[in-house]
Image: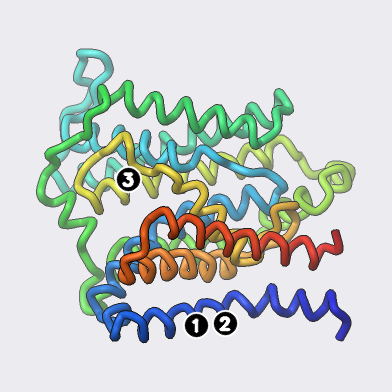
């Protein structure tokens, strides 16, 4: 086995070994607290939101793009969906739709969040494909726009209090399983993302565009339409994540979602998604999200400063990117 093949093997299986090592280390260092049922449920709920965002970003990154706006979309979708849930649909001073009964309102707020995310994601895709603006720049602009709109919409104040049932939903579990509802939704999103990416023509188009966009165009793939759908999908999942986060914290907070885009990108990259495009899997992203969640939670339990947590996470991501560069032969 030559050096490059050896490094490729490390990049494929090393993340799983690293996850196991982290879990065992934190279990020992915290005298078993890390592996307690309560902590595992807490970690799983934290990981759930990042997993949903990371699935959307995996599609974008494989296609050769990037989306820095997902954290701000989380905030905007969260505040809009919670306002609609509590107060109904209001435009200006006009009540267009009265509030639904709470259970119906929770379901309706999911569709509101998906719609908000889809619109913002489609706008990103439109700017990237029609005006040929670099994805980094286009989504950086949207990051600022969406965050600003979240503050404007709420006057800088959280949407609270919310009905008790909202917080109950965020803390609920699937009957007879004990699995948190947020985790179930995240796994469902990951499963659907995996099927789309690995078993559909759309998934093949995503890989083709990321591998060689010009070759994909010459083969008859509608690059503009596929990219528009990719960014719309990423936005929709960010919107869903925003609504679910709001139920978890029982508040629509315009400050929520800060730095979420970096955690989601980190999960995808750690899971083997290449920042150069053309390579990645949802399963790998799911493992990457687990690593990020375990690392964050373990360091918190050990009382490590948040500043050092950022440093540690940065080095882990840097290592993953360097491995990716080696396996690509650059």
Q: Position of residue 231 (x, y in %)?
A: 59, 41
Q: Position of residue 229 (x, y in %)?
A: 61, 41
Above-or-below relation of 136 to 178: above
Picture residue at 67% right of the left edge, 31% below the top: 128
Give SS at disc 3.
Answer: helix
Report the residue marked by disc 3. 243
Q: Position of residue 206 (x, y in %)?
A: 70, 52
Horizontal arrangement in the rendering, residue 280 relative to residue 157 (left or right): right
Observer-nearest residue: 290 or 316? 316
Disc number placed over residue 20 in the picture, else none: 1
Marks 2 and 3, how far apart at CA: 33 Å
Above-or-below relation of 253 to 307: above
Report the residue marked by disc 2. 17
Dot 3 or dot 1, earlier in sequence: 1
Disc 2, disc 3: CB below 8 Å?
no
> Which image quarter holds the N terminus?
bottom right
Colour mapping? rainbow
Marks 2 and 1, how far apart at CA: 5 Å
The label nearer to you, 3 versus 1, is 1
Above-or-below relation of 15 to 278: below
> Which image quarter holds the C terminus?
bottom right
Horizontal arrangement in the rendering, residue 196 relative to residue 72 (left or right): right
Disc 3, disc 1: CB below 8 Å?
no
Marks 3 and 1, how far apart at CA: 31 Å
Horizontal arrangement in the rendering, residue 169 relative to residue 109 (left or right): left
Picture residue at 21% right of the left edge, 15% below the top: 94
Q: Can residue 195 be seen here?
A: no
């Amino acid at each position: 086995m030559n050096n490059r093949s050896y490094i490729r093997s490390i990049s494929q299986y090393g993340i799983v070994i690293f996850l196991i090592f982290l879990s065992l280390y934190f279990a020992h260092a915290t005298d078993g607290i890390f592996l307690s049922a309560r902590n595992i449920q807490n970690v799983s709920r934290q990981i759930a939101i990042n997993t949903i965002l990371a699935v959307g970003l995996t599609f974008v990154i494989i296609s050769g793009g990037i989306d820095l706006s997902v954290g701000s979309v989380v905030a905007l979708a969260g505040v809009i969906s919670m306002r609609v849930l509590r107060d109904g649909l209001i435009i200006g001073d006009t009540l267009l739709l009265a509030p639904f009964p709470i259970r119906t309102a929770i379901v309706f707020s999911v569709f509101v969040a998906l719609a908000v995310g889809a619109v913002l994601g489609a706008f990103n895709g439109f700017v990237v494909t029609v005006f040929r603006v670099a994805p980094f720049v286009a989504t950086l602009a949207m990051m600022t726009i969406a965050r600003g709109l979240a503050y404007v919409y709420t006057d800088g104040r959280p949407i609270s209090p919310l009905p008790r049932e909202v917080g109950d939903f965020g803390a609920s579990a699937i009957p007879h399983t004990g699995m948190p509802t947020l985790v179930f939704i995240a796994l469902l999103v990951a499963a659907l993302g995996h099927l789309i990416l690995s078993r559909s023509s759309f998934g093949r188009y995503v890989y083709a565009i990321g591998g060689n966009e010009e070759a994909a165009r010459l083969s008859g793939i509608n690059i503009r339409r596929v990219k528009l759908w990719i960014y719309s999908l990423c936005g929709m999942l960010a919107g869903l994540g925003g609504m679910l986060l709001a139920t978890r914290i029982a508040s629509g907070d315009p400050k929520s979602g800060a730095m979420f885009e970096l955690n989601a990108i980190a999960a995808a990259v750690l899971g083997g998604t290449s920042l150069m495009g053309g390579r990645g899997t949802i399963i790998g992203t799911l493992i990457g999200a687990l690593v990020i969640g375990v690392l964050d939670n373990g360091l918190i339990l050990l009382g490590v400063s948040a500043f050092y947590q950022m440093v540690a996470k940065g080095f882990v991501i840097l290592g993953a990117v360097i491995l990716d560069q080696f396996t690509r032969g650059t």
